[in-house]
Image: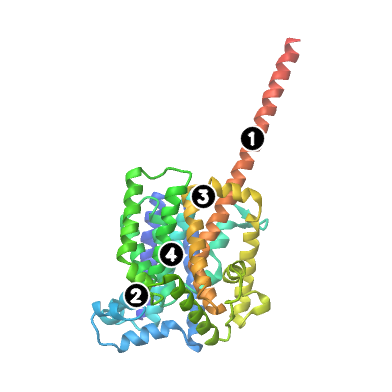
Amino acid sequence: MGFVVLLVVLFFLNEQIYRRIAAKKPLASISLLRKLFLYHLLLAGVYFAYASFNPTDSKHYFNVLSQLDISWGETIALTNWGVFFIEFPFVKYLGFDYPLCMLLFSWFGYIGFVYAYLFFIENIKEKIIVFRRYDFLTLLLFLPNMHFWSASLGKGSVIFMGVMMFIYAIQFPKQRIVILILGAFFIYCIRAHVMFFMIVGVMFGLFFGSDQKLSKGMKFFLILSGVLFIYLASSSILAVANLEKSDDLVNDFTEFASIRSEGLSENAGSGIDMSSYPLPFKLFTFWFRPLFVDVPNVLGYFSSFENLLYLMLFFKICNKSFLSFIKKAPSVVKMSVMIFLLTSFAMTFVMSNLGIIMRQKSQVMYFGFFVIYYYLADKKIRERNHWEKIEAQSQEVYEKQNKEFLNY
């Protein structure tokens, strides 16, 4: 009964969200968002079935908190405190059991997709068809791996929601200050270092973007806020790698990455030794593996299909025109490029398990897809403008010749 009640409440909350979206963004497809929620629930059910027969972090987060007799504030002292902090009032005050927590956190993941959708349609108005028949945005929103790893009790659903809330709000921080603060909090409490990458990406976009959407005062405020956050949170960021007391960050991080990589590789059947890989192949592994030749299990075959799709999409930017596009790209594109590359670069040094790679990269792949989508839309607009210009010139020549003929 509790599960049904929560499900009804979530459907009601969704409808309120849809109503606000429809009022502010008339071109948004509410029917698409409704289908997306049902699809996300389906993948949440698949994950729940998977978790029933396999050890997962979701069980750990629920069981640990259920057995502890602590206050809400004391959860901050726990390892991975962000999940426990967010989970606490629902478990301790409302009496949520494991299935209810799974449903709630899967909804958090869905909210991430809602903000991802809003971020895309706000910045890209052009409809793009890929592989001759598929709408690019719809294809991106229904990628199963993205939903699977953001549909359960754990870090994946919360940080995905936080990242998408933050990236959506940062373009208009004054109007979306509440969403911006909430998104930043969710990112920070789950992975402080990812918040660092987000801030660096935003600063990069502000400094090097071709557009001037924000006033100089707002840019100064955002940069000052980012620097202040990095200063205040530096200990938390470095603590991720136990480097808060380090005197040699470069060497100590290299040592940490080596130990971490070896540990992940040894403790799972899908481990791979990436320590000897050159950087390009490390990035390739993080973005596009597992492929069919190295799938670790049945789940890996589904991921391989999706990774092949990623690879085919990335082939679309392997040309000289993309480099020209990046040089003149607006701040939102350069911001996305920087976040995507920075996060990918950092994770390649500590990831050596294909299962963990599949889960972790779902947080950043949408930034890469956004850049591809924006490039294809820009290319389509330029080509259309080119042909319209040629048509206008042809019409002008025709009218001139016709006038000369009549005069003759």
Amino acid type at circle 4 is Gly
Q: CA distance from mark 4 to mark 1?
A: 38 Å
The answer to which quarter of the image holds residue 352 is bottom right
Q: Which marked residue is nearer to the observer: mark 4 or mark 2?
A: 2
Tell me which residue sits at (67%, 32%) in the image. Answer: 391
Q: Which is nearer the N-term, disc 4 or disc 3?
A: 4
**Which residue is the site of mark 1?**
388
Q: CA distance from mark 2 to mark 1?
A: 62 Å
Q: CA distance from mark 2 to mark 3?
A: 44 Å
Q: Which is nearer the N-term, disc 3 or disc 1?
A: 3
Q: Which marked residue is nearer to the observer: mark 2 or mark 1?
A: 2
Q: CA distance from mark 4 to mark 2?
A: 35 Å
**Which residue is the site of mark 2?**
245
Tell me which residue sits at (33%, 48%) in the image. Answer: 220
Please say if 313 is above or below 212. Answer: below
Residue 133: x and y, percent?
A: 66, 57
Give neighbour class at mark 3: few <14, some 14-19, many 20+ (Cα, 10 Å).
some
Which secondary structure, mark 1?
A: helix
Give neighbour class at mark 4: few <14, some 14-19, many 20+ (Cα, 10 Å).
many
Residue 245: x and y, percent?
A: 34, 75
Amino acid type at circle 3 is Ile
Tell me which residue sits at (40%, 64%) in the image. Answer: 196
Give neighbour class at mark 2: few <14, some 14-19, many 20+ (Cα, 10 Å).
few
**Which residue is the site of mark 4?**
112
Please say if 338 is above or below 87. Answer: above
Tell me which residue sits at (45%, 55%) in the image. Answer: 119
Q: Nearer the viewer, residue 66 or 82?
A: 82
Asked whether residue 340 is in view, the answer is yes
**Looking at the rendered structure, which numbered label has been put on residue 359?**
none
Amino acid type at circle 1 is Glu
User: Decide: marks 4, 1 in contact (CB < 8 A)?
Assistant: no
